[in-house]
Image (cartoon, rainbow, N blue to C red):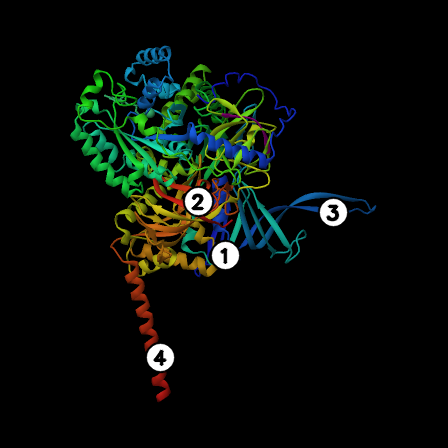
Amino acid sequence: MKLVGKYINKDGSGHVSLRPEDDEDMWHLYNLIQEGDKVRATAIRRVQNVSSTGSTDSHRVRTNLTLEVTRVEFTPAITSSTADTTNAASTTAADVTASIQISGRVTVENPHAKMGAHHTLDIEVNRDVRIEKEQWDSVALNRVEEACVPGRGAEVAAVVCGEGTAAFVLLSEHLTTIRHRLTSSIPRKSSSSTLHEKGLNRYYQQLYAAFLRHIPYGSPTIKVLVFASPGWIRDSVYDYILKESERTGNKALMRAVREKGVRIHVSSPHVHSLVEVLKSPEITAQLKETKFAKEGITLDRFFKMLGSDEMRAWYGPDHVALAIDRGAVGTLLISDQLFRASDPAERKKYVGLVEAVKDKGGEVVIFSSMHESGQQLNQLTGIAAILTFPLDVEVVEQEEREAKEAEEEERRKAEVAGEDS
Amino acid sequence: MAGLNLNDDETEGPVVDEEPPKVTMAREKLLEEARKAIEASEKGKRGVSLIVIGHVDAGKSTLMGRLLYELGRIDEKRRVANERGSNKVGKGSFSWAWELDGTQEERERGITMDIAQQSLSTPHRQITILDAPGHKDFIPNMISGASQADCALLVVDASTGEFEAGFERGGQTREHLLLVRSLGVSQVVVAVNKLDMVQWEQSRYDEILGQMQPFLLQSGFQQSKTSFVPVGAMSGVNLVNREGPDATALSRWYTGPTLVDLLDVLEPPSRNITAPLRFPISNVFKGQSAAYAVQGRVCGGIVQVGERLRILPGDESALVKYIEHEEENVEWAADGSNVTLYLTGVDPVHLNVGSVLCSPSDLIPLATVFTARVLVFDVSVPVTAGASVELFHQAHDVPASMSKLLATLDRATGAVIRKNPRVLTKGASAEVQITLRSSAYSGPNARPRPIPLETFAANKEMGRVLIRREGETIAAGVVLEIVS
Ligand SMILES: Nc1nc2c(ncn2[C@@H]2O[C@H](COP(=O)(O)OP(=O)(O)O)[C@@H](O)[C@H]2O)c(=O)[nH]1
Ligand SMILES: [Mg+2]
């Protein structure tokens, strides 16, 4: 993302202009733009002209629209799939990129848009967007900064395979994009080993073709090519691809697989096994600075703590807020989803929690919901914490209740005293 | 082997919707005939299916290979071929296992990766054998086999240190036993194998029994339904008899039943033929003459040639052209039988492992959210609300999450101990809500594909689930209610 302009007042209000360059930037914008913000971007409007002779012609004009946002929607890049039949392979492929739609009311009138009219903006790559907020909080400002670091971060391409299935996935700092899914029905060995062998062979062929098409193995931003599976399929796939690249004289592929290929054992062929990939030593050694590896490691630390010392692993907004109150939070795990709350007070609450942890020298990891670790955190209410010292949830809750009761008692006494005098 | 008549898969071509085979019998008449046939079989050979389980390398495949040979199911020519083949790749010790480890990769690695299906007969039983992989990574295949079995044969390796390795935490002896028990298998025969490695010492055999018995009881196997037998799979000792020089050491102290004696008295399943038909698909392949073959077990009801069946999930249906049971064509198959159905009039894209075939008038419900009563296994990390898991049902598994922890329950009485617990720890009994996850990262509106599922009250076999996380089985349960 390019930072085109930025003006923030002392009171936190102001505007930022950004130029998105890829899917990842779309995701940043989606997380920055909130209901109530004013957003300006170019839009296409159809205009009808009535000429002096009475004939009408219509043409499109590009115009700047400014909307007060009522709704933001993010559509991820589409996943294509090959569902194999035993006769023929039917493939749907679509290289559609991610996009955002913003709806709202026009706040700046121009010849093509009436004040207050309802309108939708499709945010496009390489066109500037100006976002005006009444309050740029620290989480939003950090995101702008993070989004505008020049150059693209490291990426990982992964093929997660099982017997007859494969998912082709690209991981960037904030996004997981499943480029393609392959399902090929391999008769199980109880039918006959010849049928099984044949099915397996066809699966490798299909996988190879899909790999060439969906994995940009030559791209310099791809730092690692992961082959993940339970059992030994990843080895067979790896060998098959090397063998085919040699046979067809595809030197670039051969080099990419040799130099960047890593084979990682995971326990299941589902895409969610990517969490196992991201916390594997093979990946953390090379990519521990990347956001996705950091998320993976942190979530793993949380679960390990939950296993070894339940009193130091808390989750849920109310419980985590209590732990923060007591200065017990060493690491806060929080999902970007919580900051997209439509209620500004809700967002403010979470921004407050983040700031409180940081103020006390704690670490904050904001998870992307577009990564598997973020999805898992979302299922765990979106917020969790690793505590620096053990606290018993029930004891703390009990203390809170007592404190509240004591407070009420005080107030009642004060009221009674007031009436008396 | 079931399904070996499929060598003509060259006959590619469009699915032709030819003249449908006639439904041979009206339902009433069919039920009557089935009842009679089942009664008649009570006097002759009764059918039962057996899953062979145990830690990797315990000797499961070897035991089955040798048993098939002893019972005359493998002829001398085939035995020699297996011996030669395995010697050639330097895996001579796996020559008996070769019969079951049929794929190239299994033979090269000397490891069973998927269920092998065989049939054998003892004086009073016709047994479908499902040889399971022991390796941790292939537990999904083992589960798919176990959901088709009535009984289990557990093989343990008696050699020094090996029994212990399989039996301790992380070994498959325990996990397999818990898995099959959770899937409704209540009878188990324990074959204590490789006693030749410990000079056939009775003390070792007794020691192993001493450790296994309490664990079996604890895991819910009644003592009357458990039996033990000392064997030497490799040399064929005490499988069918105790003849020959290899058996003399054992004969000195053992006078009990042989393995076949024990298999011959396995309790066959009760057959509920009036229930609605449920046929969960565990394998799909191309059969003869433009038919597609699906393998599986009839889990309730009865299916006959000529019937049109609905395929769930989805709107498609297919016609039953043939039914194959134990290598023979049959007119119908009843609850509890492991069969291959040959279907026509359907595009094979609609035939998937995990789909369920039903009669069009009595469909199985579809679910994306349901509640279950679960028992938490010996987990290393407690189960939290929202935990990402894989849900195993019949032959397939899907991503899911433990969306709500509703209550922990007393294991004995089922009374609620605590509502909305924060975590579930090992050994807990609990009521939970499980939600299937959509596997794409497509924002909040992505909906998962439902799976065919039934409450345990409606159909026991279709109402059992297993829950795994990162390669560890964390819980087993029964479906209470389908929420949506
Ligand atoms: N000494 C001895 N070795 C055996 C016996 N049964 C099996 N084995 C060996 O154990 C190894 C594993 O056997 P296999 O049948 O593949 O085990 P599975 O993984 O349980 O199916 C092979 O090398 C066999 O030769 C036995 O009775 N005695
Ligand atoms: Mg084996």
Nearer to me, B314 or B259? B259
The amino acid marked with disc number 2 is Ala
Nearest to N terminus: mark 2 or mark 4: 2
Kindly state the secondary structure of the residue where label 2 is placed.
helix
Gap in angstroms between the C-alphas marked 1 and 2: 22 Å
Gap in angstroms between the C-alphas marked 1 and 3: 37 Å
The amino acid marked with disc number 3 is Gln
Disc ID at residue A147? 2
Nearest to N terminus: mark 4 or mark 3: 3
Kindly state the secondary structure of the residue where label 1 is placed.
loop
Gap in angstroms between the C-alphas marked 2 and 3: 40 Å
Disc ID at residue A412? 4
Residue A343, image x and y in percent? 49, 59
Nearest to N terminus: mark 4 or mark 1: 1
Q: Tell me if residue B438 comes above or below residue B90 in the rendering.
A: below
**Residue ID for mark 1:** A342
Give the residues drawn in magenta, as a range: B317-324
> Could you tell whether A88 is left or right of B65 in the image?
right
**Residue ID for mark 3:** A48
